[in-house]
Image: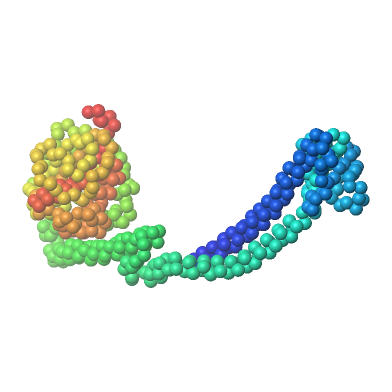
Amino acid sequence: MSFRTRLILAYVLLWVLILLLTLAVTFYSISFGLYGQVERSLTGYVTELAQLYASGKAGEVNTRTRLVNVTLYSQGGQLIYPSDTDFGQRIPRNYIRDASETPKPFYANDFIAVYQRIPGAIIAVSQDTRYIEVISGGVRNSLLVGMAFLLPVGALFIVFAARVALVPLHRAAQEVDRRGPFNLSPIVYTGPKDDIGVMVERVNELLRELSEARDRERAFLAEVSHELRTPLTSLNGYLERLARNPNDSEMLERSRKIAAHTVRMVQDLLALARGEAERTVNAHIVNLGDILRQAVGEYPGVGLKMPEAFPEVLGDPDRLLQLARNLVSNAVRAAGSAEKVRVRVWQEKEPTDYPRDPYETQDEARVTSTPEMRSLKQPWAAFAVVDSGPGIAPEVMPRLFTRFARGPEGGTGLGLAIAKQIAEAHGGQIRVASRPGETRFTVFLPLLAENEEG
């Protein structure tokens, strides 16, 4: 059963319930209203008669009118007037015995009576109510006829309104049904931006993200294939030379370096795919200066400036070394030379896209990949990897840390994604700012609690 059918059935059922409720309320309102009006009229009349009897003007009482009957009872409940034994609007004796000077009603099947105690007797007035049943029955029949007419008419209007109102949803559902792994085009929607419009917009965003992810995956696979093919081809060539000349130490060393590079690339791929950079953090008290000295030492020519006594951080030394190594490696590749890369270390109050550099001034605005975010105001360890390369194009910045996104300097696009995972796994952040001639990656890591006051 379709959603449209279920909705129509639900509204038709609701329409039936409304009609039945209207019938019941109208019928009982009219019936109770008529009975209440008769009771109020009889109460006023019996009060007036009791006053006449009390004032000695009993002779002015008209004991029988066209609609109302006046009766008198003894205090024991015996009917005094009228003496007609066939008089049918009698009040039971137990009610008469409980009479007081306050009017009380009595409801029977075909009449209503109101009685009150007067000196020496009980006076009562009554009225036939069978006409009320006749009126109520006529009203009930009229309402049933009206309901029999309104029910199908209302149902038709509900069906029409539901079909018209659900046309955008029906079209959107058909468009979504046509989408699949080989069709991720956005859904065309021309309706208002209501709940359906918002839903279609979110689905389009999801389709766009899926399409971009698929394109990135294809580009990533092609790039990784190329990156792996080159060292494997070289390694194969070196091995062939070694087969001819086993004592060639230079070929052996080159083979080892290419094998190590390939192993590192495969490990990065596995770590990124499994999210190990986020999960496997073995925290220790780490001297950030030692980590950076080791990372910079692998690339002779990279400059390093840092305080003599730098506070320690809590982190995984292997992961932090991997983070620093990735940033320095990317910077060297982007700048084209290790001499054009420098690393700066200092303390900061809070992360920012434009951190101060205690070693030099920076007056020129840079394009950033991250908006200014509110961070905890606490002491942070900050280190920046700055290169004098061509800079990063503004269109590349939003996807710089995205998995499988190729950076401006080439490569597989793994290093920055892993670096971001490691920084966030340590409760820190990584920011980037760039302009022509300079790119600055800044990592913020929270300092240890005992060093916060310093």
Residue 253, image x, y percentages: 14, 56
Q: Which of 425 and 129 is in front in this view?
A: 129
Total count of labels: 0
Q: Nearer the viewer, residue 18 or 328?
A: 18
Q: Which of 213 and 89 is in front in this view?
A: 89
Placement of the C terminus among the 4 image quadrants:
top left
Position of 103 with respect to 300 (left or right) is right
Residue 170, image x, y percentages: 43, 68
Q: Residue at x 19, y 35 (%)?
A: 347
Residue 208, image x, y percentages: 30, 63
| Scheme of image coloration | rainbow
Report if residue 131 is visible in the image.
Answer: yes
Q: Residue at x 25, y 30 (%)?
A: 451
Residue 310, image x, y percentages: 18, 33
Q: Residue at x 59, y 59 (%)?
A: 18
Q: Residue at x 30, y 45 (%)?
A: 425
Position of 423 with respect to 233 (left or right) is right
Report if residue 247 is visible in the image.
Answer: no
Instruction: Report the residue that reaches farthest toward the top.
Output: 453
Position of 299 with respect to 125 (left or right) is left
Q: Which of 74 and 273 is in front in this view?
A: 74
Tell me the quarter of the picture where residue 306 sits.
Answer: top left
Tell me the quarter of the picture where residue 377 sits.
Answer: top left
Whether residue 140 is situated above or below residue 444 in the rendered picture: below
